[in-house]
Image: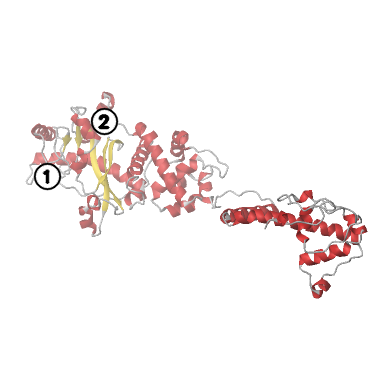
Amino acid sequence: MEISSFLFPNQEDYPSPNFFSFFQDFDFPATTDTTAAPIAAEPLPKKRRVDDFDFDLEQVVEQGSLKSVEDILNKFLGFDKEEDKTELKLDWSSQEQFANQSVFDFSNQQSGLIMNEKVKPMAGTNNKRSRQNSAEFISTSEEESQPQQQRRLWVKDRSKAWWEQCNSPDFPEEEFKKAFRMTRATFDMICEELESVVTKKDTMLRQAIPVRQRVAVCIWRLATGEPLREVSKRFGLGISTCHKLVLEVCTAIKGVLMPKFVQWPNDDYKMNEIKHEFQMLSGMPNVGGSIYTTHVPIIAPKVSVAAYFNKRHTERNQKTSYSVTVQGVVDPKGVFTDVCIGWPGSMSDDKVLEKSALYQRANKGQLKDTWVVGNSGYPLMDWVLAPYTRQNLTWTQHAFNEKVGEVQKVAKEAFMRMKARWSCLRKRTEVKLQDLPVVLGACCVLHNICEMRGEQLNPELRFDLFDDEMVPENIVRSMNAVQARDQIAHQLLHQNHAGTNFL
């Protein structure tokens, strides 16, 4: 509807034609000037503003046209019938006040009509945006109506009583060592070494976990092998947070502490010291280390299941077993000097050895005049000394095998202490296969730290370590090594180093 398209009778008396163009069907009272010539109707301008309406309401009232205004309003508002008029209980005694109010309401209605005419075509094409704006307005109004509240930190309140008790200076040393497998002094040293790597900054939402608590979560998890939900209860942290902390601290231990505490003795002084200690132990010359391979049980992986299937453990335990290997070389004190971690449990000891960095080091000639003593699962090579495995051994060969066993016992005892301290190595771990080498490497580093600092193992934690030995297909890979082994066996017998345990 074009609002400005109506004609009206007298342009001069009603200078605001847009207002009265609605009421062309009604009779307006005659003006006082009857001699005025009629003015020809002219087309009205289109869509004039409501603010342009200008007429003298007092003049209309003085001229007695208030009744006409009442009729106009009643007809416009739909009160044509008598019952409708009676329902509209208005006080017409105050005519001037009513007239002013009516004109004001009518002006608002007219402006509303004009606005609606403009908005209607757009409303159908933008309903979604309108609903969004309405929802935003309602939510904003609700927020403004509610009192301002301080924003809460999204951190669940958990009890940290156990950890706070352990971290207290009054906590007994024996209890601390029982929980973390080390004394408080060793624990403090590890925290100091890792502080620059594992420290986190506070954020606007929460405070960072202290370094001591981060390290404690990792060490307690490795020491007990308890599930993550138990770690969460002990330290008052979320399960996913505990899992993340274990991996972060293990990665820091492997990256920061492993180069310091797991080193192959490259200089002659350290190597000669190791050779001397082994010779004092067994009488065998030029022994630079004792090598051993153990298996760590795992949950059946989703890929390459057959590669991690441990046939020997399955047959012995009558239970399907999957594992990864940890191969290490130790010195006379049981400290690891070389480790090879993470190869599938189906691989034999000699295959794992071929994959190790020690094997590459030996091929480069870095193990010249040095023996690494292994059990029957290793082949005899120029730098690997293995026992005799054939039947009907001579007295000399039996004596040699006995001394090899004494050297092997050092490595086996070291692996036993490592698995006893870090019980997670004896349980099927929940760690993903790709993250497992980092965790196993951290256990080797922590073992070395405890051994170097003289941390004694609790006798209650000791157990009998057993790993199946599978004789390799090619047991002899160097004829020079065969001659060297026979010579060492004769020297042991003639120097009265051979025992009589084999008799």
Quarter of the image that includes the N terminus: bottom right
Residue 433, x across and y down, in percent? 32, 47
Task: Name the kind of residue labelled 2 in the image.
Answer: Ile
What is the count of numbered marks? Answer: 2
The CA span between labels 1 and 2 is: 31 Å
Q: Which residue is mark 1?
A: 473
Q: Residue at x 60, y 54 (%)?
A: 122
Q: Quadrant of residue 441?
A: top left
State if disc 2 and disc 1 touch (CB < 8 Å).
no
Looking at the rendered structure, which numbered label has been put on residue 153?
A: none
Q: Nearer the viewer, residue 350 or 52?
A: 52
Please name which of the two marks, 1 or 2, marks the residue nearer to the observer.
1
**Which three-letter amino acid code belongs to the residue tagged 1?**
Glu
Mark 2 neighbour class, 10 Å CA radius: few under 14, some 14 to 19, many 20 or more? many
| Circle 2: element type | helix
User: For the point 17% across and 44% down, which residue is it?
Assistant: 377
**Rendering coords of residue 426 (x, y %):** 32, 51
Q: Is residue 382 visible?
A: yes
* Foreground pick, 161 / 14: 14
Residue occupied by mark 2: 274
